[in-house]
Amino acid sequence: MKKFLLGLAICVMCSLSASAYTYVKPAQSVYFNPQTSTWSEVKQSNDDVQLTNKSFIGSGGYEEYYYNDGKLAIGPIANLGFINNGQYIAINSQDLKFYKYTFKNGEFSYSELTPSDVQKLYPDYKIIKISEFKNNSITINKKFMKKQKVLLLNDTANSFYKYNYEPSSVNPSYIKPFVEISHKGKIIFSHYGDDTVESPALKIYVKNKF
């Protein structure tokens, strides 16, 4: 069963199409150099520290990183991540947040990326911040006969644990911040269809722009 789940996770990671970035796979090792504060997918020098990814698969899954001696290096902050220009970028898919891992005083820590940081990583996406929703709704315009790529970015303290899209086709990558819109209509982002004070549904109304 463990081998099956690992294989399934790898297949999912390989099929992710939200960006051109290569996501770190379960059981894959990455390397961090404390001298240069840079990350890499392959060992660059003897100063590099090897860290191995351990992913827990599921709707509430997360990833951790371990040293060679089995000690925990980075706890369950995100669901997946990738290395870009020497930095490790982590995505919390459930909370629609992006982080950067850093190393200080012998420990790894993380800081949340700003909207401008995220936009630089995903220039083809229109960022919609959760704070921009009014009464849990927002209306966007897309060009007629053109696809619109949207990135939902959570700039609030709200959690969207186990939220999903209806229709599900707008989230083909399964990475929750990324939405691909082909048609006008209504998109609902909710916790199993709930729309309550505790679990409010977010509604995105899409109109064509000619």
Image: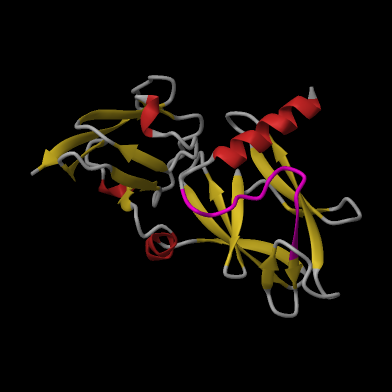
In percent of width and height, residue 149 lies at 32, 46
**Residue 104 pos. (x, y %):** 70, 72
Residue 30 belongs to magenta span: yes
Query: Quick check: 24 left or right of 47?
Result: left
x 54%, y 46%: residue: 92
Residue 198 lies within the magenta run: no
Residue 116: quarter of image: bottom left
Q: Which residues are magenta?
A: 19-31
Horizontal and vertical percent for residue 178?
Answer: 41, 43
Q: Residue furthest top?
A: 193
Q: Where on the picture, by quarter, is residue 189?
A: top left
Indicate the quadrant where residue 6 lies: top right
Residue drawn at x 43%, y 25% is: 191
Vertical placement of residue 83 versus 132, above or below? below
Examine the rendering and report whether any part of residue 142 can be seen: yes
Which quadrant would the N terminus be assigned to in this image?
Answer: top right
Position of residue 139 in the picture relative to residue 107 (left or right): left
Q: Nearer the viewer, residue 37 or 106?
A: 37
Residue lying furthest bottom in this view? 35
